Image: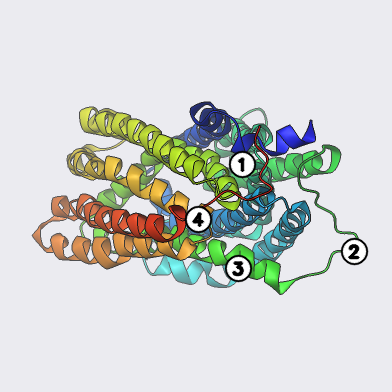
Amino acid sequence: MDQVKENKMGSKPMFGLIMTMSLPAMFSMLVQSLYNIVDSYFVAKLGTQAFTAVSLAFPIQMLILSVAIGTGIGINSVVSRRLGEGNKDKASKAATHGLFLALISGVVFAVLGILFTKMFLQVFTSDPAILKMGCDYTYIVTIFSVGIFMEINIEKTLQATGNMIYPMMFQLSGAITNIILDPILIFGLFGFPKMGVVGAAVATVVGQMVAMTFSIIIVEIKSHDVHIAFKGFRFEWKTIRDIYAVGFPAIIMQSIASVLTTALNGILIGFSEAAVNVLGVYFKLQSFVFMPVFGLMQGVMPVLGYNYGARNRKRVVSALKIGTAIAIVIMALGTILFASIPDKLLRIFNANAEMLEIGVVAFRLICICFIPAAIGIMSSTLFQAIGMGTRSLIISVLRQLVVLLPAAYLFSFWGVNYVWLAFPLSEMISLIVAISITIAVFKKNINTLTPLDNQLVN
């Protein structure tokens, strides 16, 4: 029975396997996206200043999430490959190291948040009200960030074993807690004090702590293909190196989005606060399209990693093709949504006339990049799954720093509407590079795979 369970990623029909692995993550990501939208919806009701404050703090939240997800991707890649090789001890060792890395990351961000939050926000605003609300919000989400680090590392570990249900439940517990607490704490319902922006931050970290607690309980009381144990634990730099060989490029790749948002805010604030708010709304809403694709990525990555470790070329190719096709369908639906009803999407956040004028053009131009992005995301998933995270980093740096930012800056001289053209331009160029790198990886690493002599065939 244990052998069959261990080898399901190497034996089950591919489409059904990917859907089984991905749907729980896609569903939980959709709920997470809904939380992001609901959170911003309530904050927007506090006024333009409150929404601007949270928008300016958003890059810091993205940075926290980037480190958490990047480290988790590294853990996922190592654990899934070790399981594919049949080495459960090394897989368990990587999983245990992941919890220590989560604790260290939480402490680092708490210190950085206390020391540098005000300095960071002062770069973008001199408005005392916006600055205070932004600082209050950011202090809370950084000081208590350990919850998200712990939960995501455990989530990625279980996903690497093929268990997608518990990770979905972790995310749902946090997101639903967040959604419930947001209006209660922001507006002071049911006898609670009206906390405003601080209430939104408190709801966020409480949700993360609930998810963390749930994940730790499940790890302790349930049996898994990897065993996390601190008794006799010894810190090994080789395991850390293996995790960050994929994790560090993934962190940088994810963090670039934070750098990009910060820099774009700097460009757009030269036009108006409305332009900054449009970008903030876009990033909230686009998560509703991109998050399901990232959920798909979570399901496909361990399948790719397991079969690469087992040297099963046919299943690696099949997983990549099917995953890419599903991602394209999701992104096509997102493109239709953003192109057809941008005004209705903006009005969810009480957009004024200036935001509508800027935002309708922005949404229709940016969504051109959605379908090319689907192909790029799945290429990056392949690279990360087989331990080649640097390739993903190259594509991400090219797309967001080498092309998008300079293009946005140059286009800004022609007017705010031209800034948005930088998004499809950078995605098209990076797609060409991604396809080229994928072809090279196939020739050198995928096409030469031959099954292990001891590979179980069911």
Q: Disc 2 designates what residue? A: 232
* Between discs 1 and 4, the one toward the N terminus: 1
Q: Residues within 10 Å of mark 4 (few under 14, many from 20)?
A: many
Q: How many marks?
A: 4
Q: Disc 1 designates what residue? A: 203
Q: Disc 3 designates what residue? A: 114
**Cα distance in 3D space between marks 2 and 1:** 37 Å
Looking at the rendered structure, the kind of residue marked 2 is Gly
**Cα distance in 3D space between marks 2 and 3:** 35 Å
- Residue visible at 19% across and 55% down in the picture: 419
Q: Residues within 10 Å of mark 3 (few under 14, many from 20)?
A: some
Q: Left or right: where does residue 354 sit relative to residue 375?
A: left
Secondary structure at numbered mark 4: helix
* Between discs 1 and 3, the one toward the N terminus: 3
**Cα distance in 3D space between marks 1 and 3:** 19 Å
Q: Is residue 39 visible?
A: no
Q: Residue furthest right?
A: 231
Secondary structure at numbered mark 2: loop
- Residue visible at 62% across and 33% down in the picture: 172
- What x and y, as percent, mark residue 316? 49, 44
* Between discs 4 and 2, the one toward the N terminus: 2
- Residue visible at 69% across and 34% down in the picture: 166
Q: Disc 4 designates what residue? A: 384
Question: Closer to the camera: disc 4 or disc 3?
Answer: 4
Looking at the rendered structure, the kind of residue marked 3 is Ile
Looking at the rendered structure, the kind of residue marked 1 is Ala
Q: Residues within 10 Å of mark 1 (few under 14, many from 20)?
A: many
